[in-house]
Image: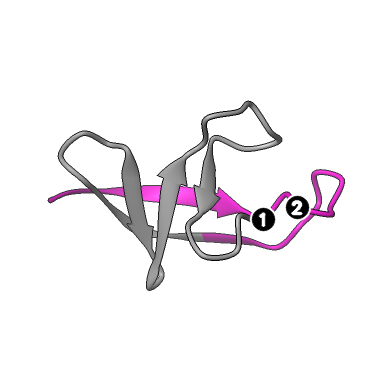
Amino acid sequence: MQSRLMYVELKTDYNDNGPAWIGKAFFSRSAGTIYFNGLAFLKGERQSSGNYLERMSGD
């Protein structure tokens, strides 16, 4: 898996001032899934306020 240092911000129910983290993220081979801080994020099908959605909660 390829890794990269990333800035991740929670945008659900926040007006661009939600909590944020900087850390190492790991990408699946197709970059359709990102693994960060013990969570899996899937590439969003709809254009919401973010690019990826957390797999379990949808945030």
User: Is the image coloured rainbow, by chain, by secondary structure, or in one colour?
Assistant: one colour
Give the amino acid type for the residue marked by disc 1 in the picture: Leu
Picture coordinates of residue 28 (x, y %)?
A: 21, 46
Give the CA separation, mark 1 to mark 2: 6 Å
Secondary structure beneath label 1: loop
In-front residue for pair 44/51: 44
Report the disc number at residue 12.
2
Q: Residue at x 75, y 52 (%)?
A: 12
Horizontal arrangement in the rendering, residue 28 relative to residue 8 (left or right)? left
Report the disc number at residue 51.
none
Q: Residue at x 76, y 57 (%)?
A: 18
In-front residue for pair 52/6: 52
Whether residue 39 appears in magenta in the rendering, the answer is no
Q: If the image is split into quadrants, where does the C terminus sit? A: bottom right
Whether residue 14 appears in magenta in the rendering, the answer is yes
Secondary structure beneath label 2: loop
Residue closest to the far bottom: 38
Q: Residue at x 33, y 46 (%)?
A: 33
Q: Residue at x 87, y 45 (%)?
A: 15
Report the disc number at residue 10.
1
Classed neighbour count for the residue bearing mark 2: other residues with Cα under 10 Å, few (<14), some (14–19), many (≥20) = some
Picture coordinates of residue 48 (x, y %)?
A: 68, 33
* Proximity of marks 1 and 2: CB atoms separated by less than 8 Å: yes
Horizontal arrangement in the rendering, residue 10 relative to residue 14 (left or right)? left
Picture coordinates of residue 37 (x, y %)?
A: 41, 70
Q: Quadrant of residue 10?
A: bottom right
Give the amino acid type for the residue marked by disc 2 in the picture: Thr
Residue range in magenta is 1-21
Horizontal arrangement in the rendering, residue 38 relative to residue 47 (left or right)? left
